[in-house]
Amino acid sequence: MKMASERECFDLSGPLHLTSIDWENENHRRSVAASLVQGVYILERDRQEKRLGDQAIAPPWWEFFHFQLFRQLVDDADSSIFGAIYEFKPPTAQFNHSLDGSPRYVIAFRGTLTKPGSFSRDIELNIHFLQHGLHRTSRFEIAIQAVRNMVALVGDSNVWLAGHSLGSAMAMLAGKNMAKTGIFLNSFLFNPPFFSAPVERIKDKNIKHGIRFATSVITAGLTIAMKATQQRGPSEDPFTALSAWTPYLFVNPADHIGSEYIGYFEHRKKMDDIGAGAIERLATQNSVGGLFMKAIGKESEPMHLIPSANLVINTTPARDLKEAHGIHQWWRDNMQLESKLYSYR
């Protein structure tokens, strides 16, 4: 059994400053949600390193905020822990106005772990995501069943979703599935992956806009062509059903895995401003890769595309990609954050 690293230990790297939680405070909610996701990472590390009982180091990541571990979500392919359901159990003395907005349950999903006990399965899931096929995996089936069961048990207003990286893709897909049935869950998605060319890393704004404009025109054109060859009932905009769901997306400009969300939403607004909103409404819900998969007979929905979001950008300079894509940044109390609400209409 290896000694735990400093980054795994709550007492050394967790948000110890949050001794009292105000559930109406967005910074507090973000920090708690990120810590619960970290708890899933450490649950799996405890399993891999056989840290049991008093030797387990995961519990402080949720117990500090008065949560209990309600259930572990275990992958049926490799027995790794990929998610957890936490139940909020505050001390009786804390039942007052400060608990307004608190969840009863949080369902959290971790991202990829580069350790032998789960790495190969995590990579396989990442490949499924790139192929727009995450919804066809057994791991996602376990996840969505857990979400449906909890919502049926306690109601949608009492359940939060949270995830990081691959885990945020799982949470996003679960949230989208629930939103299609009229259930809109509070969701906290950290460093969600965006599958596209990293246009956001181009410094020249005119070149950036030109590339995005051309891509939108091509995507919209392909979408129209695809629809013309399909037998359909009454025309329906699938984004309309999802538009009332506004998950929190937490992204870092230096993280090329997810930073494209910044350009995705900014470009949509810019297209509206220049009178090209109709083109962008078609383009924004499709990807060239997804359309190609449909063209060869594989039903495919771009899982990373969503109509509405509370986009939170961490503009604090990052040392490297590892820090920019890491979960630890999201519970720090000295960040420079920009927040924008994007609504689809």
Image (cartoon, rainbow, N blue to C red):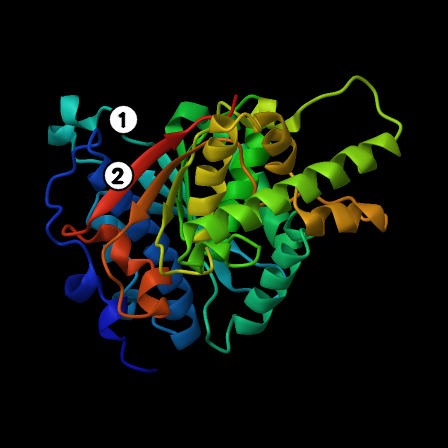
| Residue 96 in view (yes/no) | no
Real-space Cα separation, disc 2 to disc 1, in angstroms: 9 Å
What is the count of numbered marks? 2
Q: Is residue 343 above or below residue 80?
A: above
Which residue occupies the foreground of this view, 276 or 133? Answer: 276
Residue drawn 39% across the image and 69% down it: 45
Locate residue 182 relative to residue 3 in the image: left or right.
right
Question: Which of the 4 quarters of the picture holds residue 232?
Answer: top right
CB under 8 Å between discs 2 and 1:
yes
Disc 1 residue type (three-letter): Gly
Q: Quadrant of the N terminus?
A: bottom left
Q: Secondary structure at mark 1?
A: loop
Residue furthest front as drawn: 206
Where is residue 209? Give x, y as percent. 50, 46
Which residue occupies the foreground of this view, 125 or 206? Answer: 206
Where is residue 200? Give x, y as percent. 45, 54
Where is residue 206? Give x, y as percent. 46, 49
Question: Which of the 4 quarters of the picture holds residue 231?
Answer: top right
Q: Is residue 49 above or below residue 157?
A: below
Q: Which mark is residue 196?
A: none
Q: Earlier in the sequence, mark 2 or mark 1?
A: 2
List the residue tagged with mark 1. 101
Where is residue 197? Give x, y as percent. 56, 58
List the residue tagged with mark 2. 29
| Residue 293 in view (yes/no) | yes
Disc 2 residue type (three-letter): Arg
Question: Which of the 4 quarters of the picture holds residue 127?
Answer: bottom right
Residue drawn 66% across the image and 40% down it: 217
Q: Secondary structure at mark 2?
A: helix
